[in-house]
Image: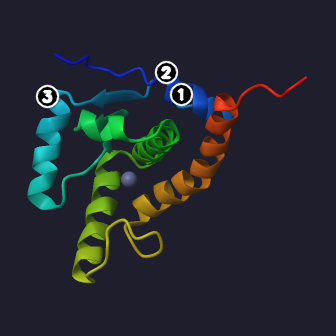
Amino acid sequence: MPPLTEPCQAERELLKAVGVSLPSTLRVEVGTRRARALAWVFTRLDAPPAAFALGRTVFIPDPAYFARLTLPQRAALLAHESVHVAQWQRLGAPRFLWQYLRDYLRTRRQGLDTHDPHQGIALEREALAYESRLLPLLEVAAGAEDAPPPAA
Ligand SMILES: [Zn+2]
């Protein structure tokens, strides 16, 4: 059985290198039974989600998907999901779910991508904006770590 919680140490350290601290209470479950069961429920409503947050837990149902991402992409994904965790705390579960569902139905009615960066679900737009702002910084920081030390 895979571990219940993934520490994501490398991702946390890379985020720290660009000045972002994931909350220590943030939990990440990759490929757990619970993550896969919840993903199945979402799949009944929409496309299978690559990742989602409920409360302060980030669920990534497919470990192969997570493994295929580069380290900066994995860190950016966790940063995206951490925005949802913060939204959940800011709004409370009922308002978070209500706003998400309301916008989800609106985007569906309008034939839009739920994750459209300009007209998609508002809670997603906030997370997508943060993720796309961080990704280039994370790529530079990861590249700097891989680069050989400068010649003396
Ligand atoms: Zn999202």
**What amino acid does circle 2 point to?**
Gln
Is residue 23 in view?
Answer: no
Q: How many marks?
A: 3
Residue picked out by circle 1? 12
Q: Residues within 10 Å of mark 3 (few under 14, many from 20)?
A: some
SS class, disc 2 = helix
Residue at 28%, 76% in the rendered image: 106
Residue at 29%, 36% in the rendered image: 59
Of residues 85 and 91, which is closer to you in this image? Answer: 85
Q: Which of the labelled discs sits on residue 33, or is there none?
A: 3
Residue at 28%, 54% in the rendered image: 97
Q: Residues within 10 Å of mark 1 (few under 14, many from 20)?
A: some
Q: Which of the labelled discs sits on residue 9, or is there none?
A: 2
**What amino acid does circle 3 point to?**
Arg
Q: Residues within 10 Å of mark 2 (few under 14, many from 20)?
A: few
Answer whether labels 2 and 1 touch (C-beta < 8 Å): yes
